[in-house]
Image (tube, rainbow, N blue to C red):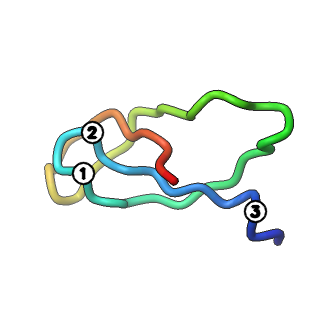
């Protein structure tokens, strides 16, 4: 598993890093944003890709 494909997902409300995922950075240039469950907020919130 190459390390350069790993991304961190941060909660849009509490700004905690809850998820790690992979993406092909050569084909997808934009930052990923998904609705995921945050266990600190206890609800589904938008999670954005961070550095």
In which quadrant will I find the N terminus? bottom right
Residue 35, picture quadrant:
top left
Relative side of 7 to 25, left or right = left
Relative side of 8 to 12, left or right = right
The alpha-carbon separation of the residues under discs 3 and 2 comes to: 23 Å
Q: Check contact, mark 1 vs mark 2: CB within 8 A.
A: yes
Sequence order check, earlier mark of 3 and 1: 3
Question: Label 2's element?
Answer: loop
Looking at the image, is 34 positioned above or below residue 23? above
Residue indicated by mark 1 = 15
Rendered location of residue 36, percent (x, y): 38, 42
Circle 3 Cα neighbour tier, 10 Å, few/some/many (<14 / 14–19 / ≥20): few
Rendered location of residue 32, percent (x, y): 56, 34
Rendered location of residue 17, percent (x, y): 36, 60
Residue mark closest to the camera, 3 vs 2? 3
Rendered location of residue 28, percent (x, y): 75, 31
Question: Label 1's element?
Answer: loop
Circle 1 Cα neighbour tier, 10 Å, few/some/many (<14 / 14–19 / ≥20): few
Residue 48, picture quadrant:
top left
Relative side of 40 to 19, left or right = left
Sequence order check, earlier mark of 3 and 2: 3
**Numbered mark located on residue 12 in the image:** 2
The alpha-carbon separation of the residues under discs 1 and 2 comes to: 6 Å
Looking at the image, is 27 positioned above or below residue 19? above
Q: Kindly identify the residue that appears in the image at 85 percent across and 39 percent down.
A: 26
Residue indicated by mark 3 = 4
Residue 7, picture quadrant:
bottom right
């Amino acid at each position: 598993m190459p390390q350069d494909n790993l991304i961190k997902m941060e909660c849009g409300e509490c700004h905690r890093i809850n998820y790690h995922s992979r993406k092909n950075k050569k084909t997808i240039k934009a930052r990923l944003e998904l609705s995921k469950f945050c266990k600190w907020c206890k609800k589904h919130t938008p999670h954005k890709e961070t550095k």
